């Protein structure tokens, strides 16, 4: 992002035309980023709670309260009674969790397991092809067949979507696998709509059809994979028809898309984050990722599998800078998707009595919202939130500390999708009394009397330490630099996977989803609910901004006409969606964009946008996948009733 500054005021943001991935355009989320920076609703000074209300305070007073609250929690119940909570904020490593981790580690706070986003998926892909740069998006235009699986790039990754459009312009066919007709599915050449959480069955059916037709690449598999004979044996236990019954996709369709993938070269599989929000997800991702190996797709430039290029994404690591060695003793771990339980379970020892949140809005994005809100409302819970806006989470704080935006702080950003590292130079001074997360935690450390020299590190020094082993060359001047691990254009034509053996391990395992596959639960809650991202919000970020909100003014759920008729639900009416965990109310759109049996509840609106102040999150489950400990937002059964 290029920022034009006049007299200390940012006046324009634009994409960098030289950048190989963004090629000069900004997506609809951030193209009006200045509206966010200069919003009237920005929190620009600290707030403290007095007599039930938040009121303005000086940094001095706010820091005293923070130090007092954290010290009290630690003295009374031990350091583990303090729970940190954060996710990616604006995706930066410096403003992410370095200075905060140092402070919280020193206090002996509980460790937060941050698996809420993509962990189930990369646990699975790592089991198959290991830590890999995968297929570089800059090679995608070479593909002639693209299988987009559980991914809606037209909304969630528009720059990467452009690379697929380049492939299409050169003749590629795009097939989308998604229970919902997403914007991407709408414009694809073909849309396959499985039941949520049954993707592994679909992939097994495709592989079975490929092997039946003799289209597998046995030579490549024998040379570069482990488990080829076992895979054939496992596929022999399944039929395409049997897979069809599980995933709800007609057998002929499964066969057709399987054979098309195997017989067109180069063939690219691009996995999204959406197909992993259920109990069997890691096995599903390891199974789906086996498809391009079975067909030898990795041989070709632009062929193979892409998901999150772990090798390049993790090449620059903040791990050592977090200083886990500062912990006075080993600490327990709490998973961020089980916040509701962590804050409300009476048996938890020690209880959580202090909650420190930055870069995240759990009142909107964490599952089982009733429990989360009940926990945040506890009078005996001390809550500190570092925020840019008065989110549903910040509204529960005892102390709010004003945070800077990307224009106001220094950072280094990694990518989940492409191979570039990005430099974030502050363009303007912090607005009002806002401070970068790093500075807020430095001040908290000082107020607590923590004296390790590491609390004196400036942001520049953190960057230097972070990039110590990285050839920075033009990173700081140009703003971006490709992470070159020698991956080249065809990283695995000759194997060389980032696994222990260097070979890819083939999988064909279907682990059923927990609730979606529960026939007894289905009697009471017949609909499987999924929660895709919206086009113009980033999770709950930007949902309070005028332009984005006016384009997506009210939350809705989407229901198939057959399911609507059966319940007397009319298009445009208000509905209540419920299960044993909770309920929410909003408008319904009746459309075959939703698959029969599936209720689509896009996520991101703030709670006040819903009739009862509860979002779809009130129905989602805190259950975690066994491997990867990841959330199961879309493994959720609900029922819907008409309100009007
Ligand atoms: N506009 C926008 N962009 C974003 C975000 C945003 O909120 N809005 N969020 C950012 C973040 S944090 C992330 S992680 C990425 C996520 O990017 P995506 O992976 O594209 O995000 P989702 O919308 O969660 O899921 C993609 C699709 O998976 C489908 N899906 C749901 N369940 C299943 C299933 O069981 N099987 C299959 N095959 N498909 C399923 C959904 O209907 C959805 O259309 O996007 C990032 N970019
Ligand atoms: N039902 C359901 N729930 C989901 C998902 C789903 O698909 N379905 N997706 C999950 C996924 S993939 C993800 S990644 C998570 C996202 O979870 P979060 O990361 O919590 O999501 P956001 O809503 O983007 O909230 C980020 C907050 O950080 C603030 N922020 C931004 N920059 C800074 C900064 O520099 N400093 C401070 N202090 N604050 C900052 C923003 O104002 C915003 O309020 O949600 C998960 N929740
Ligand atoms: Mo995410």
Image: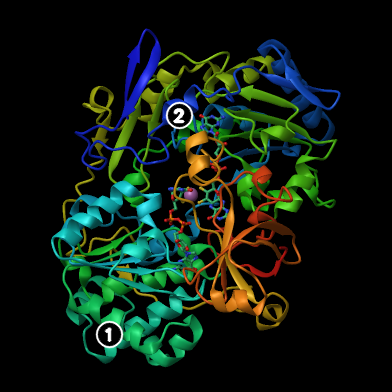
Q: Residue furthest left?
A: 170
Q: In the picture, residue 203 is in which quadrant? A: bottom left
Question: Residue 94, which numbered label?
Answer: 2
**Residue at horizontal 39 percent and vertical 18 percent from the top:** 10
509 relative to 491 in the view: left or right: right
Residue 637 spot, x, y in % from top left: 65, 70
Q: Secondary structure at mark 2?
A: loop
Q: In the picture, residue 481 is in which quadrant? A: top left
627 relative to 175 in the view: left or right: right
Say which of 71 and 577 sits in front. Answer: 577
**What residue is pinned by disc 1?**
210
Marks 2, 1: nearer the viewer: 1
| Mark 1 C-beta to ligand 1 under 8 Å | no
**Residue at horizontal 60 percent and vertical 79 percent from the top:** 517
135 relative to 157 in the view: left or right: left
**Residue at horizontal 25 percent and vertical 43 percent from the top:** 21
Q: Pointer 1: residues within 10 angstroms few (<14), some, or many (20+)?
A: many
Q: Residue furthest top?
A: 7
Q: Is residue 86 visible?
A: yes
Q: Secondary structure at mark 1?
A: helix
Residue 148 spot, x, y in % from top left: 33, 64
User: What colour scheme was applied to this rendering of the protein?
Assistant: rainbow
**Residue at horizontal 76 percent and vertical 38 percent from the top:** 81
| Above-or-below relation of 579 to 474 | below
Q: CA distance from mark 2 to mark 1?
A: 47 Å
| Above-or-below relation of 462 to 607 | above
Q: Is residue 500 visible?
A: no
558 relative to 338 in the view: left or right: left
Say which of 227 and 594 sits in front. Answer: 594
Residue 259 spot, x, y in % from top left: 25, 82
Marks 2 and 1: CB-CB under 8 Å? no
Q: In the picture, residue 106 is in which quadrant? A: top right
């Amino acid at each position: 992002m290029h920022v034009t500054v006049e007299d200390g005021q940012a006046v324009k943001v634009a994409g960098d035309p030289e950048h190989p991935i963004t090629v000069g355009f900004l997506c609809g989320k951030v193209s009006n980023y200045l509206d966010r920076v200069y919003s009237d609703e920005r929190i620009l000074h600290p707030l403290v709670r007095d007599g039930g209300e938040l009121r303005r305070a000086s940094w001095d007073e706010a820091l005293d309260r923070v130090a007092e609250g954290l010290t009290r929690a630690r003295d009374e119940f031990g350091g583990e009674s303090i729970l940190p909570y954060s996710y990616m904020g604006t995706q930066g490593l410096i403003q992410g969790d370095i200075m905060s981790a140092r402070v919280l580690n020193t206090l002996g706070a509980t460790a937060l397991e941050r698996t809420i986003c993509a962990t189930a998926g990369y646990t699975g892909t790592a089991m198959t092809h290991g830590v890999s740069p995968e297929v570089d998006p800059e090679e995608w235009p070479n593909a002639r067949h693209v299988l987009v699986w559980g991914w809606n790039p037209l909304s969630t990754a528009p720059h990467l979507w452009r690379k697929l459009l380049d492939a299409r312009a050169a003749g590629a066919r795009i097939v989308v696998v998604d229970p919902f007709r997403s914007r991407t599915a709408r414009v694809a050449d073909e849309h396959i709509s499985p039941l949520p959480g049954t993707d592994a069955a679909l992939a097994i059916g495709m592989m079975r059809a490929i092997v039946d037709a003799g289209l597998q690449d046995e030579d490549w598999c024998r040379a570069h994979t482990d488990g080829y004979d076992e895979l054939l044996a496992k596929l022999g236990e399944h039929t395409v028809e049997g897979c069809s019954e599980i995933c709800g996709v007609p057998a002929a369709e499964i066969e057709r898309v399987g054979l098309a993938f195997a017989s067109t070269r180069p063939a690219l599989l691009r996995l999204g984050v959406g197909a992993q929000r259920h109990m069997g997800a890691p096995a599903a991702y390891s199974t789906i990722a086996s498809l391009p190996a079975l067909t030898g797709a990795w041989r070709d430039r632009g062929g193979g599998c892409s998901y999150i290029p772990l090798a390049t994404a993790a090449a620059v690591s903040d791990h050592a800078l977090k200083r886990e060695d500062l912990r006075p003793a080993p600490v327990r771990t709490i998973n961020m998707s089980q916040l509701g339980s962590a804050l409300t379970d009476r048996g938890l020892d020690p209880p959580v009595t202090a909650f420190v949140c930055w870069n995240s809005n759990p009142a909107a994005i964490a599952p089982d919202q009733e429990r989360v809100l009940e926990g945040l409302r506890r009078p005996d819970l001390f809550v500190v939130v570092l925020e840019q806006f008065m989110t549903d989470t910040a509204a529960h704080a005892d102390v709010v500390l004003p945070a800077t935006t990307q224009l106001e702080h220094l950072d280094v950003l990694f990518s989940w999708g492409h191979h570039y590292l990005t430099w974030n130079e502050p363009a303007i001074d912090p607005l009002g009394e806002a401070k970068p997360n790093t500075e807020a935690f430095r001040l908290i450390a000082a107020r607590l009397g923590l004296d390790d020299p590491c609390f004196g590190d400036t942001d520049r020094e953190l960057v230097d330490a972070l990039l110590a082993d990285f050839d920075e060359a033009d990173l700081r001047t140009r703003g971006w630099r490709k992470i070159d691990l020698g991956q080249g254009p065809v990283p695995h034509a000759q194997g060389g996977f980032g696994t222990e053996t260097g070979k890819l391990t083939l999988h064909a395992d279907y682990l059923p989803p927990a609730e979606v596959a529960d026939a007894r639960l289905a009697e009471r809650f017949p609909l499987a609910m999924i929660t895709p991202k919206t086009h113009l919000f980033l999770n709950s970020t930007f949902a309070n901004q005028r332009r984005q909100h006016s384009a997506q003014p009210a939350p809705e759920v989407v229901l198939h006409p057959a399911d609507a008729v059966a319940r007397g639900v009319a298009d445009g009416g208000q509905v209540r969606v419920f299960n044993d965990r909770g309920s929410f109310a909003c408008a319904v759109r009746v459309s075959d964009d939703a698959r029969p049996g599936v209720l689509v509840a896009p996520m991101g609106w703030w709670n006040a946008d819903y009739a009862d102040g509860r979002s779809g999150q009130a129905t989602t489950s805190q259950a975690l996948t066994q491997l990867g400990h990841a959330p199961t937002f879309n493994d959720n059964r609900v029922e819907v009733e008409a309100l009007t």
